[in-house]
């Protein structure tokens, strides 16, 4: 995986952040995923004190493998862009990091509207600040998988959130990814035997 600096970052609100954390984490070229709170003004949000923020996933990716429009495609398929937001906590929103992302997001939104003849309600807003969510919400699908979750949390310790392996496995246990991709991945990683056999059983 490329070091930070040679990666790029994108941020999306797509409903409960557990789902998109797994969806993006399964993608080749995604280096890191983190879930958090953004899009509001509350200075110190937390899960039980969210203020006006939204649950978001932040995706760090290798631009040699993936580009922003690839992530936008997943974004459109991961929420209902034609309905008004329900709770602000779960609204669909594209939080752009710069002018290039804004232009690409607007283009992609307009194409979707043209293609469907419907108006797209998902707002495109500048990302102001991202607040990392509590540890229990990071890679939730993996964390809550028996045996595997505990083994991986133990192996990675404080590095769990930022681990590419944990991001990928979080996606795979949630059912994302292709069989060939999973097989190649399993062959390439060095996991504790208990974790590996649990994974082989599940995938
Ligand atoms: N437990 C909630 C969503 C949690 S998500 C982190 C539910 O499934 O409705 O907001």
Image: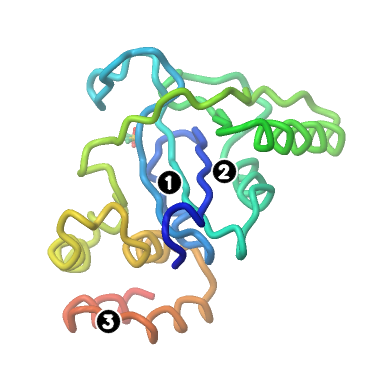
Residue at image position (36%, 28%) is 37
Vertical comparison of 84 with 136: above or below:
above
Residue at image position (73%, 33%) is 103
- Assess mark 1: CB under 8 A from ligand 1? no
Q: Secondary structure at mark 3?
A: loop
Left or right of residue 199: residue 91: right
How packed mark 1 is, by other alpha carbons closer than 10 Å (few <14, some 14-19, many 20 or more), is some
Give the mark, 1 or 2, whose residue is nearer the N terminus: 1
Which of these two is toward me, 136 or 10?
A: 10
Give the CA separation, mark 3 to mark 2.
Answer: 31 Å
Q: Quadrant of ligand 1?
A: top left
Residue at image position (39%, 75%) is 203
Quadrant (top left, top right, bottom left, bottom right) of the N terminus:
bottom left
Q: Disc 3 designates what residue?
A: 190
Look at discs 1 and 3 and give the one toward the viewer.
3
Give the mark, 3 or 2, whose residue is nearer the N terminus: 2
Residue at image position (40%, 39%) is 17
Q: Disc 2 designates what residue?
A: 78
Question: Marks 1 and 2: CB-CB under 8 Å?
Answer: yes
Left or right of residue 146: residue 38: right
Q: Disc 1 designates what residue?
A: 19
Residue 63: x, y in percent? 60, 58
Residue 155: x, y in percent? 16, 68
Q: Secondary structure at mark 2?
A: loop
Give the CA separation, mark 1 to mark 2.
Answer: 9 Å
């Amino acid at each position: 995986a490329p070091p930070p600096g040679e990666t790029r970052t994108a941020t999306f609100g797509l409903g409960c952040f557990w789902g998109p954390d797994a969806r993006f984490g399964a993608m080749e070229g995604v280096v890191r995923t983190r879930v958090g709170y953004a899009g509001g003004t509350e200075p110190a949000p937390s899960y039980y004190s969210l203020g006006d923020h939204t649950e978001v996933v932040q995706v760090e990716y290798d631009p040699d493998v993936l580009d922003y429009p690839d992530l936008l495609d997943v974004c459109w398929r991961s929420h209902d862009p034609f309905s008004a937001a329900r709770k602000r906590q779960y609204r669909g929103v594209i939080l752009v990091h710069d002018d290039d992302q804004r232009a690409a997001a607007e283009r992609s939104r307009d194409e979707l509207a043209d293609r469907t003849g419907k108006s797209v309600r998902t707002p495109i807003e500048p990302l102001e600040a991202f607040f990392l969510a509590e540890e229990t919400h990071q890679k939730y699908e993996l964390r809550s998988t028996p045996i595997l979750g505990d083994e991986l949390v133990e192996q990675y310790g404080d590095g769990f959130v930022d681990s590419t392996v944990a991001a990928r496995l979080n996606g795979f246990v949630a059912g994302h990814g292709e069989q060939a991709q999973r097989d190649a991945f399993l062959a390439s990683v060095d996991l504790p035997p208990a974790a590996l056999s649990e994974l082989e059983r599940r995938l």
